[in-house]
Amino acid sequence: MRAYVGVGSNLGDRWANLALAARVLRASPGVAVLRASHVFDTPPMGPPQPRYLNAVLELEAGLTPEALHAVLASAERAAGRRRGLRWGPRTLDLDLLVHADRVVRTPALMVPHPGIAARRFVLEPLAELAPDLVVPGLGRTVAELLASAPGAPLVVAGLYPLP
C-alpha cells in the first residue's frame, strides 16, 4: 500500500537526521522507500526555535497504519528524539500523512494526519510526489489543498539526502 510520511528536523545535523530516517525505513521489513521530495527550509510552528528542514517520503508499505507508525517512532528514537513540549524542537519528526485510502482515528494515531490540509510545509513536498492524490476523508486532492493553504511558497533547500 502506498503511504506518505512527513519528515522534519530542526536540531543537530538536520540533513543527517533526514538521511537517518530514510536508512531506518529502508531497513524495516515491509517498507520500501520509493521516492523523496525536495527538502524545504521552513519556519517552525509553536514556541521560538530553530528553522526546520522538511520533506515527504513516498513508501510502499506492507504494514498496517499502526505498525508503520511504530516503525516511524522507532526511527525517531534512533535519532535521539525526546518527547516533551508540544510543537517543540526535535531531532527528527516523522508523521504518517496518508496510508492508502485508510482513515484511522484512535487516541494513538490519526490518519490522514489531522493538520495535513493547513500545513504548507507538508503540502508542498507532498504535491511534488502526488498532486492528484485524493486525501482520504477530505475528498480533495493534494493540489487543491495546497492552492488554499495559508502562507507563501516555501524555499527549497536541496534534494532529500537519500543514502
Image (cartoon, helix red, strand yellow):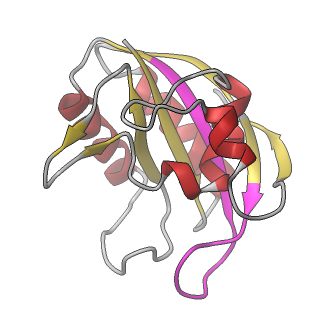
User: With 122 as the anchor, is 62 left or right in this view?
Assistant: left
Of the pair 143 and 20, the residue shown nearer to us: 143
Q: Residue at x 22, y 47 (%)?
A: 109
Q: Residue 12: percent from the left, percent from the top?
A: 60, 66
Where are the magenta residues, as a range?
A: 41-59
Look at 50% across and 74% down and name the residue there.
Answer: 89
Report the residue that reaches farthest toward the left.
107
Farthest residue to the bottom: give it.
48
Q: In this view, does 116 lie above or below 11?
A: above
In-front residue for pair 124/55: 124
Rendered residue at 42%/28% (across/down): 25
Q: x, y percentage for residue 122?
A: 60, 47
Question: Does residue 107 belong to the magenta stretch?
Answer: no
Quarter of the image that includes the C terminus: top right
Residue sitting at 67 percent across and 54 percent down? 120
The correct choice, above or below, for 134 with respect to 137 in the image is above
Residue 147 in sight in this render? yes
Vertical relation: 122 (above or below) 163: below
Please say whether residue 161 is visible from this viewpoint: no
In the rendered view of the protein, which quadrant contains the N terminus?
top left
Vertical comparison of 83 with 28: above or below: below
State yes or no: residue 47 in magenta: yes
